[in-house]
Each structure stands twice: as structure tokens, then as C-alpha cells.
């Protein structure tokens, strides 16, 4: 994902540093190649295809299905997301900062709470808990969007009429041209071995 993917602005109108990685492959009309799309009609065909792409060593690719497929993550070679660790660190850090802030302020503005010492930890619990939960919730939401590449206002796949059936009754594998192993001929040969219904190149158009 590039920063340009998050902006509702045509890629050609963005500064070069914001456009993301470019590809050396182009279509016949000179349009840069964004990736290669393969279509399948059955769930087992999709599963076998993603296993073949995974075993071939591709990293920048995805699969699309009109419904969830059990075990597709393992077939694609997904590792466990790092988001829970980020959430844990952010939540605990926020709670610790909230506690320390109250402890520090109590030294300059001492306040008796239920007859306890000024540095007693019990009065600090509500704020410590609330700030920890607040930052955890925001980290979860923002992290989920970031790891999923959202919000994305446009994707080159929407140019394919066939891809629209990914929400109906067809299955797809898409390999992006930014993958270091991508080559139009070699990638097509790999996908042809998985017996797709159709293969097409997708251009990077604004």
C-alpha cells in the first residue's frame, strides 16, 4: 500500500514521492500494469490457486470470494497479525502514563481522598482504567484500518467488468505488478497451471 491509495486524488496529480512504487511493465496503450487477475468458478479451484501462488513465493497478492472460505488464510500463508501486540503496548503505556500523571500532579496539588495519603494508588484507578481503555479502542480502530489498507477510495480492479462478480458467484486471485517476482509471462504461466476461467492484465489508470 502506498500513501496515494488513501487519498481521493488521481495518482498522476500527486507528487512522485506519494505515488508509491512504480512498475516497469506497461499495456499496449502505454498504461502501467498494476497486476494480473485470474478468475475461477469453484471454491476448490481458488484454494488450489492460492496455494500455488503462495508456494511460488509471491508476496504482494490477494484473493477474492463472495463469501468467507474456511482455512483460506492458511492456504495463502498468512501469519498471525501483529495488531494485538501493538494494541497491548499502546493500552498499557497509556494506562501507565495516566497513572504517573496523576501521581506527579498530586505532589503539586495534594488532595485528600477518603482520608488516604496523597500518593495512595486507589484514587488513581478510575482515570488509569479509562485512559487505558480509550487509547486501546483508538489503537484498535486505527490499526485495523491501516493494516487493511482502508479507507481506499479507488482500486484498479474496479475497471474489470469480470471482477464485479466477486460479490456474486466468482472467485479471483490478483497478483500485483509491484511484487518482485512478477513477470507478465511467468506469472501468466503459473496461473494457467491452476486452470482459471479467465486471465487478464489490469492497468493502473486514474
Image (spheres, rainbow, N blue to C red):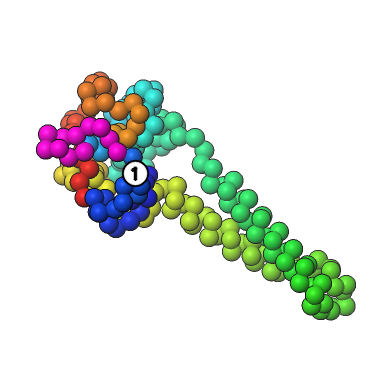
Q: Is the N terminus in the top left, top right, bottom left or bottom right quadrant? A: top left
Judge left or right: residue 31 versus residue 50.
left
Q: Which class describes the residues within 10 Å of circle 1: few (<14), some (14-19), or many (20+)?
A: some
145 or 26, which lies in front?
Answer: 26
Residue 107 rendering spot, x and y as whole percentages:
82, 72
Vertical arrangement, residue 83 with respect to residue 112, above or below: above
Residue 174 occupies quadrant? top left
Whether 205 is among the magenta residues is no
Residue 131 occupies quadrant? bottom right
> Residue drawn at (71%, 59%), measured in percent from left and top?
96
Judge left or right: residue 88 versus residue 109.
left
In this figure, which residue is indicated by the disc labeled 1? Answer: 20
Asked if residue 85 can be seen in this view, the reply is yes
Residue 197 rendering spot, x and y as whole percentages:
18, 30
Vertical arrangement, residue 95 with respect to residue 205, above or below: below
Judge left or right: residue 89 versus residue 177.
right
Q: How many marks?
A: 1
> Residue drawn at (74%, 63%), measured in percent from left and top?
100
85 or 172, which lies in front?
Answer: 85
Range covered by the magenta-colored residues = 22-32
Whether 31 is among the magenta residues is yes
168 or 199, which lies in front?
Answer: 199
> Residue drawn at (27%, 57%), measured in percent from left and top?
9
Vertical arrangement, residue 76 with respect to residue 21, above or below: above
Q: Secondary structure at mark 1?
A: loop
The dominant secondary structure in magenta is loop
Q: Residue furthest left?
A: 29
> Residue drawn at (53%, 47%), measured in percent from left and top?
83
Asked if residue 173 can be seen in this view, the reply is no
Amino acid at each position: 500500500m502506498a500513501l496515494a491509495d488513501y487519498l481521493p486524488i488521481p495518482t498522476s496529480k500527486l507528487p512522485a514521492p506519494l505515488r508509491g512504487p512504480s512498475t516497469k511493465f506497461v499495456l499496449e496503450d502505454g498504461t502501467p500494469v498494476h497486476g494480473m487477475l485470474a478468475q475461477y468458478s469453484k471454491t476448490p479451484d481458488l484454494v488450489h490457486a492460492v496455494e500455488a501462488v503462495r508456494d511460488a513465493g509471491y508476496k504482494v497478492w490477494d484473493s477474492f470470494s463472495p463469501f468467507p472460505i474456511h482455512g483460506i488464510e492458511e492456504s495463502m500463508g498468512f501469519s498471525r497479525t501483529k495488531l494485538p501486540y501493538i494494541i497491548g503496548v499502546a493500552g498499557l503505556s497509556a494506562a501507565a502514563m495516566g497513572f504517573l500523571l496523576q501521581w506527579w500532579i498530586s505532589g503539586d496539588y495534594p488532595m485528600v481522598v477518603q482520608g488516604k495519603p496523597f500518593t495512595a494508588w486507589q484514587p488513581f484507578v478510575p482515570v488509569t482504567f479509562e485512559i487505558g481503555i480509550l487509547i486501546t479502542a483508538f489503537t484498535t480502530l486505527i490499526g485495523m484500518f491501516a493494516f487493511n489498507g482502508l479507507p481506499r477510495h479507488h482500486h484498479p480492479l474496479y475497471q474489470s467488468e469480470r471482477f464485479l462478480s466477486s460479490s456474486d458467484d466468482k472467485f479471483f486471485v490478483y497478483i500485483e505488478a509491484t511484487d518482485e517476482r512478477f513477470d507478465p509471462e511467468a506469472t501468466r504461466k503459473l496461473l494457467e497451471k491452476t486452470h482459471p476461467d479467465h486471465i487478464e492484465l489490469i492497468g493502473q489508470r486514474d
